[in-house]
Amino acid sequence: MRFDKDLVAASATPLVLGILAEGESYGYAILKRVTELSGGRMQWTDGMLYPLLHRLERLGLVVATWGTSEAGRRRKHYALTAAGRDALAERQEQWSVVADVLQQVWRSAQQAAQAPARPAVAEGWA
């Protein structure tokens, strides 16, 4: 399934902040977690994730430290800051409102689609 670019962009920050709220992580593990959480329906690329991580770091929402993997490779680990936790809480509230509104609109549209069609009234006859 392909996701609209705007939807991916809008959801990327709260997703990454939420994943980092689970604990510190590194880029490849974050990519795998997004794929896992979406049941394979969302697959992000390095080119999308790393600019976001760098932006979150510049904003003070995450902090990055260099570490070494079990295989001996150096990699950057990202962790949520206190400001990042606050930003996550704010984004959660915002997305809850958006999700609620979308559910209402979709429910209303579904009901309208299932309602029996009204007979057309010819102009001048009413």
Image (tube, rainbow, N blue to C red):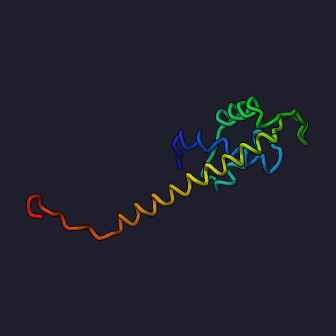
Whether residue 87 sits left or right of residue 5 in the image: it is right
Residue sitting at x 35%, y 64%: 113
Q: For this rendering, which residue is in front, 50 or 72? A: 50
State the residue lying farthest toward the top.
58
Whether residue 105 sits left or right of residue 66 in the image: it is left
Whether residue 115 sits left or right of residue 50 in the image: it is left
* Residue 100, image quadrant: bottom right
Residue sitting at x 51%, y 55%: 101
Point out the image quarter for the C terminus: bottom left
Residue sitting at x 81%, y 38%: 78
Whole-percent x, y for residue 60 in the image: 77, 33
Image height check: is 121 above or below 57? below
Whole-percent x, y for residue 124 in the image: 8, 59
Residue sitting at x 68%, y 36%: 49
Whole-percent x, y for residue 120 in the image: 18, 63
Whole-percent x, y for residue 79 in the image: 82, 41
* Residue 12, image quadrant: top right
Q: For this rendering, which residue is in front, 107 or 69? A: 107
Whether residue 33 sits left or right of residue 12 in the image: it is right
* Residue 16, image quadrant: top right
State the residue lying farthest toward the front.
126
Q: For this rendering, which residue is in front, 107 or 77? A: 107
Figure disc tally: 0
State the residue lying farthest toward the left.
124
